[in-house]
Amino acid sequence: QPQNPMALTASPVVVSGGLYPSLEDEYMGLELTQYRAQMAPQATAVVPVAGTAVATRSNSGAVTGVANVGIRRAEIKQGVREVVLCKDQKGKCGLSMFAASKGVFVCFVAKGSPAAIGGLRFGDQVLAINGEVMAGYSSDKASKAVTKSPAEKITLAVRDRPYERTITVQKDSTNHVGFTFNNGEIKNIVKDSSAARNGVLTDHYLCEVNGQNVIGLKDKEIGEVFSESPHTVTITIMPKFIYDHMMKNMGSSLRKQMDHSIPDV
């Protein structure tokens, strides 16, 4: 069996519409009315919290299309891409999937695994495995589709992180961008900060910073990623109720094993 996985980008795979849910009153089996009430817009000025703060007032305005490596690493591309993987010597891909709303989503990518090297990320939607459409599949059935695949080639049709979005912000003179977080969840937004001007929201989780996965990292470690980032920072966030639903069956020890490498561009 091959020791190193392969990944390649091919011509777009055409998938018909209608596979994605509309976020009206129900999503992933959850009643959304209560979340709408909880997530009503609020203007909040805060004092930075030690250890979890990337927040002070800033005169930085909106960021629009600033070309830097962080933006390119974090880009959520439209359309469908093809990824070809191999299994490792243990017959594994380092990939776990979660079924919701008749779709299948990546919820875990192991560090150094074929899935990580192939470019799969938390939140990616797996549309098909070796031509087998995943719509309506359970998590177990999707996993079995990978297990039964030949070791030398597993072809996935993937849509980039449909329930995440990226926001680009700028650091101020104190090296902050204007929000605080606790256990990866954004808690407060500083008035007139770059985060406020660019639409960062509370009740969302940090998934990536400049394209680097931060799920499973401690707040101090996430803070270090921010500190080491350049003046312009791109964050990838996911609504809390979706994140909680995807992560509810994943233990903290497994989260620490997630891939946190910096993606190539």
Image (tube, rainbow, N blue to C red):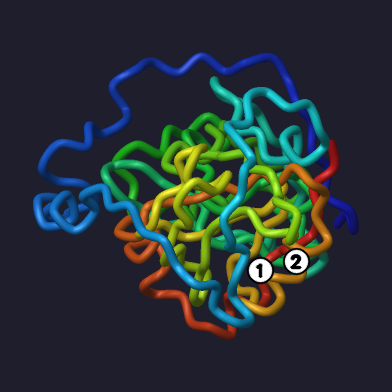
Q: Residue at x 85, y 42 (%)?
A: 264
Q: Residue at x 48, y 57 (%)?
A: 190
Task: Specify whether 138 is left or right of 162.
Answer: left
Instruction: Tell me where residue 222 appears, x and y as whole percent.
Output: 67, 69
Q: Give the residue pinned by disc 1.
A: 258
Which of the 4 image quarters holds residue 64? Answer: top right
Instruction: Tell me where residue 16 appears, x and y as whole percent.
Output: 38, 15
- In space, the residues marked 1 and 2 are separated at their CA atoms by 5 Å
Q: Amino acid at mark 2?
A: Lys
Q: 174 or 163: nearer the eye?
A: 174
Q: Is residue 167 above or below residue 28?
A: above
Instruction: Tell me where residue 223 appears, x and y as whole percent.
Output: 69, 70
Quarter placement of the C terminus: top right
Q: Give the residue pinned by disc 2.
A: 111
Disc 2 element: loop
Q: 26 or 197: nearer the eye?
A: 197
Which of the 4 image quarters holds residue 227? Answer: bottom right
Graded by Cα atoms within 10 Å as few (under 14), some (14 to 19) or many (20 or more), the crowding at tag 1 reads many
Kindly indicate whether the residue at mark 2 contacts the one at mark 1 (C-beta within 8 angstroms). yes
**Which residue appears farthest toward the bottom when viewing the image?**
253
Q: Which mark is residue 107?
A: none
Q: Residue at x 13, y 53 (%)?
A: 37
Residue 17: in sight, yes or no? Answer: yes
